[in-house]
Image: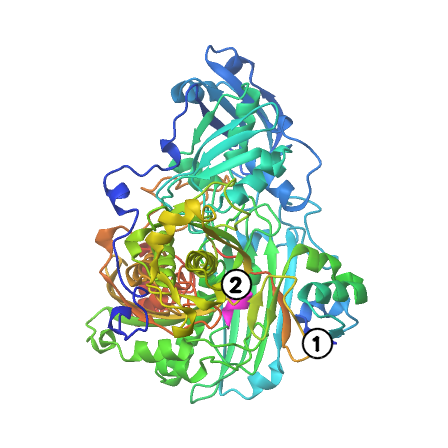
């Protein structure tokens, strides 16, 4: 059932007004990262390593610098030394030091008066390398005799004597695992593998940066988090954070990949070296795929125990993940925490390691780690359901977690909505569609924690009673609309009377990025509090005008009014009247709120997909696709549906086609969208959606966050559907046509 | 005193104990108390952990904790 059909106590929450950015985007007026131009601006190009692992012996930029119009060249020698921890990781990933750690690793950057000149000059920079042995695959990297990516990178958790590329070890669980398996009628154990994929945002990274010799500068950049960009660039360049003013542009997708820095410090360093002239740096698609983003690749063992009536008795998972050449980049902890989170299992054990490989530093990607974990666990669960002749949806419902159940990752669940999601899934008409030859239906569940985080919001009342909200979380999924709806609902005014601006780093306190599905939850929570703050001040101003105690005034339907007959007889004073008078009775009225938002509500979803597999080519066609997910409360249902559909589509790409393909030389072979194939509209049916609403008590309107859970179930749901369609179970992604065809042929031979 | 549930991999820093008791009224005091009682936990907590109170993630060191709360340290969760 769509939100619109649910009876609501709200006037605006749950409606679908026009999006505030719509006109700018359809007319081309919206300004993205590459659209900013400044007087005297230079253009940058980056020289990248052609080797997966190589010592940098010498960099000779003399021929490039000699060209007329070349204004600056920077290498690692232009950056401060002595950084540690994640600051060092960020600096090293932005610009290689003594060793290039992956194909595409930046080694030098150049600024010139035109982009063409910068690119030509970059080719004149001579770099001598000593090529070193490399390792790409996660299972290869964990071998004791694997080429060593970096020594001394392991953290405190790694026991002595571990393989050299193992940098982190994790284990947690509860219950008697052996007794749990002993109580099962069926115990199965399998190994699954997923390849690295890219977030695939359509807008490449781009910025214009200016930095003077005094350490003061500005940057315009496409990012999910302008304060993160500021802090990270300041650390990498050794300048004060407050010296850098960062303004976010409109953003053409991020999905986690634009929460950290890549080329931004290079543009700033070039500007500083070029006497403070602004420098534009726009990455090519090839640079984006070689040197930004990707998610981790994973190798995973899963063991499940189940009774013959479908009750899970024990589960054991062992995950190995590589996140490139940097400690802490893989989401192995999140993957383990999410792996069994949908199910009430008496005994669980999670083990995992993070491994270094000669690949770029992995970045967050929508519910980091959870999709891979779901692929492994939900695939094996499906296999066991079929082996026991049980309905996969009924088994999920039988084992579903609910409020009061101990989560696989430890705590007891508060109010959650998985049971409601599964019941809504079971009732959907898509499950009644008849399947034909070579067709199959797959079902899977998924989970994500969601996130709160550091948040600061300001809200100002205009002289005409309209309202401006200043928010610090870039709008990547409709947050300007959802914030305007929540503020308008709270103030009792119209949606159109509220404008939300995403502001630069000088305008508010620190905000975390738009990540973790937090913008509508955390920024929304702060915006509601800021509106309440302004309402209290407006009541105070009305009380002064009326000459009564401020406690005798309440706010209702967009106006201040006496709290009751004893307060006096005054007509309501509207927000427009208060705005018109504020200059003369106390000055501007604003509301403000800062928080580290607590009260996060976890989100569960279930997907059902019907596929048809061509037995002659192995190509999989998506026939029908259903997303059911608990939103807590859908503030703007159209955006919520868009998030559900977007998550499903990215998951479809991950399941069917997307993968990083490396050659034997460790170089990325498919660094363009022609060869790295993300789904396009003609690949897809309309994605059906059902919004379930189990309100989160930790948010004034019940919001949970909807951006990430939707990418979790598609990987196993599609694998389960393909298995049903072909009779061949494939335990590695992607399910590309050659792999599916080979599996069909192997089954035929078997 | 509050009871803090640690993930099992941390037992090697706490003499094999998985549920540690510390005197604390806030999350910050609780984390500081854990490090004071078991110094081996210092790098773990410095590297970043997530804390749940009654099943809900909290990020504030000022969040109140008491003996009545269920408190867990879990892997640090980062979103996309």
Task: Pinpoint residue A723: horizontal percent, then vertical percent.
Answer: 33, 69
Quarter of the image for residue A560 reads bottom left
Above or below: residue A242 compared with residue A136: above
Which residue position is annotated with label 2?
A335
Q: Position of residue A13 (x, y in %)?
A: 32, 65
Q: Position of residue A567 (x, y in %)?
A: 42, 70
Q: Nearer the viewer, mark 1 or mark 2?
A: 1
Residue at 28% over, 75% down: A7
Instruction: Give the structural element (helix, strand or loop) at label 2.
Output: helix
Give the residue displayed 40% in from the left and 82% down from the top: A397
Quadrant holding the N terminus of chain A: bottom left
* Host chain of mark 1: B
- Magenta-tinted stretch: A335-340
Q: Is residue B42 left or right of residue B61?
A: right
Q: Which residue is mark 1?
A: B3
> Does the magenta portion include A501?
no
**Residue A374 shows in the view:** yes
Label 1 Cα neighbours within 10 Å, binned few <14 / some 14-19 / many ≥20: many
- State the residue in front, A122 or A727: A122
In terms of secondary structure, where does tag 1 sit?
A: strand
Hey, which quadrant is residue B38 in on the image? Answer: bottom right
- Residue B35 to residue A50: above or below: below
Separation (CA) of disc 1 from disc 2: 26 Å
């Amino acid at each position: 059932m769509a939100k619109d059909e649910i009876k609501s106590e709200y006037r605006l929450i749950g409606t679908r007004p026009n999006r505030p950015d719509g006109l700018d985007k359809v007319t081309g007026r919206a300004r993205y990262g590459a659209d900013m131009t400044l007087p005297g601006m230079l253009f940058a190009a980056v020289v990248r390593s052609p080797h997966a692992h190589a010592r940098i012996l010498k960099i000779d930029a003399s021929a490039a610098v000699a060209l007329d119009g070349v204004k600056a060249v920077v290498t690692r020698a232009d950056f401060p030394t002595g950084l540690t921890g994640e600051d060092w990781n960020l600096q090293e990933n932005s610009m290689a030091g003594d060793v290039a750690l992956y194909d595409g690793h930046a080694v030098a950057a150049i600024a010139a008066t035109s982009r063409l000149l910068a690119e030509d000059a970059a080719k004149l920079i001579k770099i001598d390398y000593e090529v070193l042995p490399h390792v790409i695959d996660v299972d290869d990297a964990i071998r004791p005799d694997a080429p060593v990516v970096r020594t001394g990178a392991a953290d405190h958790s790694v026991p002595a004597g571990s393989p050299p590329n193992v940098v982190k070890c994790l284990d947690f669980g509860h219950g008697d695992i052996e007794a749990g398996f002993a109580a099962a009628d069926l115990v199965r154990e399998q190994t699954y593998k997923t390849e690295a994929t890219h977030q695939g945002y359509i807008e490449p990274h781009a910025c214009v940066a200016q930095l003077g010799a005094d350490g003061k500068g500005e940057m315009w950049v496409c990012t999910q988090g302008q304060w993160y960009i500021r802090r990270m660039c300041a650390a990498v360049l050794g300048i004060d954070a407050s010296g850098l003013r960062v303004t976010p542009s409109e953003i053409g997708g991020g999905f986690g990949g634009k929460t950290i820095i890549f080329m931004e410090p290079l543009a700033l360093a070039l500007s500083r070296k070029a006497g403070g002239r602004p420098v534009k740096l726009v990455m090519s698609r090839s640079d984006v795929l070689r040197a930004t983003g990707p998610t981790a690749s994973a190798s995973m063992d899963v063991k499940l125990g189940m009774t013959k009536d479908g009750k899970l008795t024990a589960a054991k998972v062992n995950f190995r993940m590589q996140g490139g050449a940097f400690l802490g980049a893989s989401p192995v902890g999140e993957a383990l925490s999410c792996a069994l989170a949908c199910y009430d299992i008496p005994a669980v054990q999670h083990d995992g390691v993070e491994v270094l490989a000669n690949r770029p530093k992995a970045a967050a990607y929508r519910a980091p780690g959870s999709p891979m974990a779901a692929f492994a666990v939900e695939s094996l669960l499906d296999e066991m359901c079929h082996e026991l002749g049980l309905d996969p949806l009924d088994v999920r419902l039988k084992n579903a977690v609910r409020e009061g159940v101990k989560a696989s990752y430890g705590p007891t669940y508060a109010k959650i909505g998985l049971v409601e999601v599964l019941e809504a899934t079971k009732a959907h008409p898509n499950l009644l569609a008849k399947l034909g030859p070579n067709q199959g239906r797959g079902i899977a569940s998924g989970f994500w924690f969601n996130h709160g985080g550091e948040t600061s919001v300001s809200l100002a009342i205009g002289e005409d009673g309209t309202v401006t909200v200043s928010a610090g979380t870039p709008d990547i999924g409709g947050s300007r609309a959802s914030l305007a709806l929540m503020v308008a609902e709270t103030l009792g005014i119209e949606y159109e009377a509220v404008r939300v601006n995403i502001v630069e780093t000088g305008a508010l306190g620190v905000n975390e990025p738009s990540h973790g599905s937090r913008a509508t939850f955390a920024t929304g929570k702060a915006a509601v509090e800021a509106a309440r703050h302004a309402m209290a001040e407006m009541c105070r101003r009305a009380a002064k005008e009326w000459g009564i105690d401020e406690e005798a005034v309440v706010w209702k339907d967009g106006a201040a009014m006496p709290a009751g007959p004893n307060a006096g007889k005054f007509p309501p004073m509207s927000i427009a009247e208060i705005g018109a008078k504020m200059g003369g009775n106390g000055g501007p009225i604003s509301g403000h709120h800062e928080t580290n938002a607590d009260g996060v509500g976890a989100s569960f979803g279930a997907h059902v997909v019907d596929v048809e597999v061509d037995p002659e080519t192995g190509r999989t066609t998506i026939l029908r696709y259903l997303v059911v997910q608990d939103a807590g409360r859908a503030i703007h249902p159209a955006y919520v549906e868009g998030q559900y559909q977007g998550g499903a589509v990215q998951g479809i790409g991950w399941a069917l086609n997307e993968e990083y393909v490396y050659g034997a030389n460790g170089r990325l072979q498919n660094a363009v969208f022609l060869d790295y194939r993300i789904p396009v509209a003609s690949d897809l049916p309309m994605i059906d959606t059902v919004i379930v609403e189990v309100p989160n008590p930790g948010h004034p309107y019940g919001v949970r966050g909807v951006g990430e859970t939707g990418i979790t179930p598609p990987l196993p749901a599609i694998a389960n559907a393909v298995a049903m369609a072909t009779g061949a179970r494939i335990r590695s992604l992607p399910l590309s046509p050659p792999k599916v065809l080979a599996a069909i042929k192997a089954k035929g031979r078997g | 005193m509050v009871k803090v549930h640690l993930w099992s991999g941390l037992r090697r820093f706490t003499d094999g104990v998985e549920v540690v008791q510390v005197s604390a009224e806030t999350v910050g005091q609780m984390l500081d108390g854990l490090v004071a009682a078991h110094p081996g936990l210092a790098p773990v907590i410095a590297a970043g952990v997530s804390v749940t109170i009654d099943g809900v993630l909290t990020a504030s060191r000022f969040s109140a904790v008491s003996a009545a709360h269920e408190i867990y340290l879990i892997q640090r969760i980062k979103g996309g």
